[in-house]
């Protein structure tokens, strides 16, 4: 694979990294830590597996914004203790109309290492339209998407989050 367009890293202790892995690999917890995901729509309920497609929904300026993602790779390992999640961005809609057209493709690789010198690393690769490169807007949009996910992972996903309760189980 080519050199990433953007890489972010943060050192975390092993216990904090373990919590981040649990929250990252459980879709029902995403709305609790991901600021871009007030609601999540997915083909699967909790666990993220290869091929899982999910949509992150939020309201921005009174408009519904939907981001579409697919899991290309998902791996957890115990020796050494780490997790790897590769996501492919499938696009974005605002009020049902395609937006963020400056980005042709975006792939994100998240690695969380739960060892003494561990932490979180996000690498991102993207392709932009020619016009967005000339206007210098595509890189900013892609960096903002990746930076937002990274900040949420480092700040919000490192806190223990309980599983949500299925409303049907309350009856």
Image: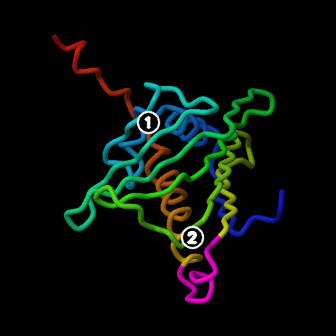
Q: Is 171 placed above or below 141 here?
A: above
- Residue farthest along the left direction in this orientation: 171
Of the two numbered discs 2 and 1 in the rendering, the one whose residue sits closer to the viewer? 2
Q: Earlier in the sequence, mark 2 or mark 1?
A: 2
Seen from the viewer's position, the closer of residues 93 and 113 is: 93
Q: Secondary structure at mark 2?
A: helix
Residue beneath the point at 64% across and 54% down: 108
Q: CA distance from mark 2 to mark 1?
A: 27 Å
* Mark 2 burial class by Cα count in 10 Å: few <14, some 14-19, many 20+: some
Quarter of the image where one finds residue 121: bottom right
Query: Between residues 33 and 131, which one lies in front from this camera angle?
Result: 131
| Residue 41 circle label | none
Q: Residue at x 60, y 39 (%)?
A: 71
129 sits to left or right of 42: right
Res 166 quadrant in image: top left
Tag 1 residue: 160
Which secondary structure type mostly characterizes the magenta part of the structure?
Answer: helix
Q: What element does badge 1 sit on?
A: loop
**Left of 40 or right of it: where is 125?**
right
Q: Position of residue 101 (x, y in %)?
A: 50, 69
Which residues, given as a range, are shown in magenta? 128-137
Which residue is disc 2 drawn over?
143
- Is 133 contained in the magenta span? yes
Q: Is residue 99 above or below residue 164?
A: below
69 within the magenta span: no
């Amino acid at each position: 694979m080519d050199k990433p367009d953007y890489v972010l890293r943060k050192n975390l202790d092993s216990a904090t990294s373990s919590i981040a892995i649990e929250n990252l690999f459980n879709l029902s917890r995403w709305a609790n830590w991901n600021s871009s995901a007030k609601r999540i729509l997915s083909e699967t309920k909790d666990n993220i597996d290869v091929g899982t497609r999910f949509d992150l929904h939020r309201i921005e300026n009174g408009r519904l914004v939907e981001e579409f993602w697919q899991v290309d790779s998902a791996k957890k390992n115990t020796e050494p203790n780490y997790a790897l999640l590769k996501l492919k961005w499938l696009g974005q809609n605002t009020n049902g109309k395609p937006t963020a057209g400056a980005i042709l493709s975006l792939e994100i690789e998240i690695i969380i290492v739960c060892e003494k010198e561990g932490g979180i690393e996000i690498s991102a690769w993207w392709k932009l339209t020619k016009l967005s490169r000339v206007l210098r807007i595509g890189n900013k949009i892609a960096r903002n998407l990746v930076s937002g996910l990274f900040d949420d992972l480092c700040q919000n996903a490192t806190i223990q989050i309980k599983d949500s309760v299925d409303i049907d189980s309350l009856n």
